[in-house]
Image: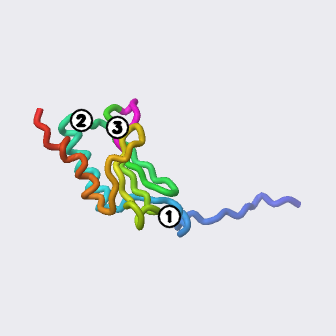
Amino acid sequence: MRSNIITLRSFDAPSKNTNASQVSFQRDEINLIMGLYGQMVSKGVWKDYAISFLKDKAVFSIYRKASEYALYKIEKTPSLKNKQGQYSVIAPGGLILKRGHDLKSVLRIFDKYRFIVK
């Protein structure tokens, strides 16, 4: 006789391995990035963003329009932490504009754009 009962795995608590296989931004990192993003949106330079949490890096992509390619990408790559620094700002062609160990100092690349008065 065939049984209609199947055993399902419990999904109440996420497994510990799920978070370990994905890189993400910490709260203070997101606060720095969103503070910069808010200033640039208020100036009318940036219009949209996307956040991607991948296996090897986390990416904050900045767009001038939602339908275009990313204007800039702010990446966190922990595998580069002990080498060149885990944070980088990348231009559309893949050119790394700035890289370092401290996110606040890496985001200073945008200071010249923040204080332009129109």
For the residues labelled 1 and 2, the Cα–Cα distance comes to 34 Å
Label 3, residues with CA under 10 Å away: few <14, some 14-19, many ≥20? some
Where residue 84 sits: x, y (%)?
A: 39, 60
Q: Nearer the viewer, mark 2 or mark 3?
A: 3
Q: Nearer the viewer, residue 104 or 48?
A: 104
Q: Where is 116 relative to 109, above or below?
A: above
Verify CB contact (< 8 Å) between mark 1 and mark 2. Answer: no
Q: Position of residue 10 (x, y in %)?
A: 60, 65
Magenta segment: 66-73
Q: Residues under labels 1 and 3: Cα distance?
A: 29 Å
Considering the numbered disc 1 on the image, is that residue within a helix, a strand or a loop? Answer: helix
**Quarter of the rendering occupied by the N terminus:** bottom right
What amino acid type should be assigned to the residue bearing mark 3?
A: Leu
Query: Three-letter amino acid code at disc 2?
Result: Val
Marks 2 and 3, the one that precedes in the sequence: 2
Residue 89: % across, % down: 34, 49
> What residue sits right under mark 3 in the picture?
71
Circle 1 is placed at which residue position?
Answer: 19
- Position of the C terminus by quadrant: top left
Which residue is found at the position 36% from the left and 53% from the top?
Answer: 88
- Of the numbered discs in the image, which one, if any, rests on residue 45? 2
Q: Nearer the viewer, residue 3 or 10?
A: 10
Q: Please say if the residues under marks 2 and 3 sit with CB atoms less than 8 Å apart.
A: no
Q: Measuring 13% from the left and 43% from the top, which residue is drawn there?
A: 115
50 vs 6, left or right, is left
Give the answer, above or below, for where 40 lies relative to 84.
above
